[in-house]
Amino acid sequence: MKIIKQLAAAFLAAVTLASLTFTAAAEEKSIILPSGISLERARRELSDKAAELGGEPQFASAAVGIFKGGEILLEEYYGKTDMENNIHADESSVYEWGSISKTLIWVSAMQLWERGELDLERDIREYLPDGFFRNLAYDEPITMLNLMNHTAGWQETTRPIWETDEAALLPLGEALQACEPAQVFRPGEVAAYSNYGAAVAAYVVECITKTDYCEYVHQNIFKPLGMEHTALLSAHNDNEWVYARRKEMNIYSFGIGGAVDLGSYLNYVTIYPAGAATGTLSDLMTFAQALVDDAAPLFKNPETRTLMFTATDFYGSSDIPKCAHGFWCMEYAVRTYGHSGATMAGQADMLIDLDSKTGLIVMVNEPNGNAFLFDTPELVFGKLSAERFGAAADSKADFHGHYTVSRSTYRGMLKLMPFVSAISSSVVRGAQSIGDGVYVLDSSYGTILLGEKTLSSGRTALQQPSADLLHDGLYIAKLILLALYILLAISAIYLLRISRKLKKHGKQVAIKGAAVMTAGQIARLVSMVALFVMIAIYAGYGGGLPTAAGTVIGVVQMLCAAACGASAATSLVSVISLKKQKARYILNTLACSVFVFAIIYFEMYRFWGI
């Protein structure tokens, strides 16, 4: 009898478990994501992707979270955080937020606005120490809204913003002054994504509250939300648990040869508010859920949250938002708000649909991202199409010429960078017009919007989500100048070799000013070597040129320009005064003159105030 009762109990338990499982599966199947597919299908596709890519493997790890309001729909971990020791990603894995960290700045700024301590349209210099900026080119005010829209006018900094030594990290104010970039655009006119500008906004918060920015965020965002597993400082040492866990996370880079284990690959961003936050998937989901919550737990008044997601920048002349108080507006089948992030240790993405209150978080431990990061947004939010805006099928854009990316270096020793990374209009020519100067473009990064606007100079700009593309009518001429610079430097190698061989065999003909001409040839060669060394150092420091290196290279370029100038002047005098070897003197005059002009135009000598 006892055995019969036990069997009956086991049977009932099995039936109950099966019923609950069936019910949960049915409920999950009934949940439809903004993309139009079921949660069950999304879960299955993510699992299939993990199985497909995990064999070789073709990815390291990914933490993926989907929520709707206060309910977690999916929290899954795929792959490994340490392949050698077979350690799988799980709820205790910590990933770097990258630029998603900036959303903490914008929430902090809106909290101060709500308390009446910050005016979003007031010149931020009124909140900062006197004389804080040294490289401003315009007298117009720089407002918090400019910083939120990335329209303060700063180019990319040419100073290092990454450190590998914890002890080398400076307080925020000092770190900002150490890497201040040049202001190259009029405030409010050109959008050029700026880590520096965002970190300045955090320093404004620090100056207003008289509280360290890190401490402010812990007390006003992390603590109220119960985010106990997120660090904010560059070295992650404001949270002991994260500090220890981050060192256990390995970073991987994938190439033709497969996975390359970079170890913990700890690189510290010096202006930490712009991209240093690090923590668990669960914590970042908690933060994102607070952003869609109508109760607005991060603000005293829910209307402040509503204002935060009100557009502050638009595409073309339309009412389609591009940015909302620092949050990027990304269009899929539905409109989302959020931010992506990338560091030397990984990438992450945070997107929220305010209408359905659906959110997505993806975090990976690969600097170049992986399929989970790139493909999951459309899986959840659907694919953007021009038809969503009622565009005609044949309304194609007709762009011409070349465009440089505003997020680059337009002043100083790296002035050549925008020209070597410019894009042809053919890349965007297939964009489909939806009216009001807005276009839908299918790109390698997915389907995106482009806006068209005219700057005060009359120059055309194409708006991307975070940086404008600037039309350059003289692009070909500038590229030719750069090409001539390189060709003339290479030709100097052959001229010097020929001269050496002629001298060795006693066939060299003595001419007036030969030594100065040779000095010019050597200078051209040295200048090109110095340029390549500068680029190598810049890349090696994660996009920064140390002051000492910049000074040495700048002085070298000045000397090279002077030597070429002297060579050109000597040859010009000889052309006028001598009757022989005129062709040789003319060619040297032209070559050295073009070379000097290239050094001056591309500001290869300029190592100060950049």
Image (spheres, rainbow, N blue to C red):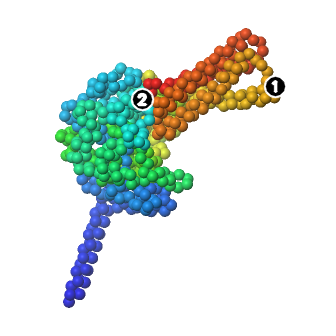
Give left or right: position of 491 versus 291: right
Residue type, numbered disc 1: Lys
| Quadrant location, the C terminus | top left
Q: Secondary structure at mark 2?
A: loop
- Which residue, as the protein is rendered here, is positioned at the far left? 300
Which of the labelled discs sits on residue 7, or is there none?
Answer: none
Residue found 25% across the figure and 84% down from its top: 7
Q: Is residue 2 visible?
A: yes
Which of the 4 quarters of the picture holds residue 564? top right
Relative to the observer, which residue lies in front, 289 or 81?
Answer: 81
Residue found 76% across the figure and 18% down from its top: 511
- Mark 1 Cα within 10 Å, few/some/many (few <14, many 20+)? few
Relative to the observer, which residue lies in front, 174 or 335?
Answer: 174
Expressed as whole percent of the image width and height from the top left, the position of residue 375 reads 42, 52
Residue found 29% across the figure and 69% down from its top: 22
Residue type, numbered disc 2: Pro
Q: Is residue 191 visible?
A: no
Frontmost of labels 1 and 2 is: 1
Which of the 4 quarters of the picture holds residue 155? top left
- Mark 2 Cα within 10 Å, few/some/many (few <14, many 20+)? many
Give left or right: position of 146 versus 567: left
Expressed as whole percent of the image width and height from the top left, the position of residue 193 reads 40, 35
The residue wearing badge 1 is 507
Q: Secondary structure at mark 1?
A: loop
Which of the 4 quarters of the picture holds residue 44? bottom left
- Which residue, as the protein is rendered here, is positioned at the far top? 577
The residue wearing badge 2 is 181
Expressed as whole percent of the image width and height from the top left, the position of residue 164 reads 43, 43
Q: Using the image, determine if residue 426 lies above or below residue 289.
A: above
C-alpha separation, residue under disc 1 versus residue under disc 2: 53 Å
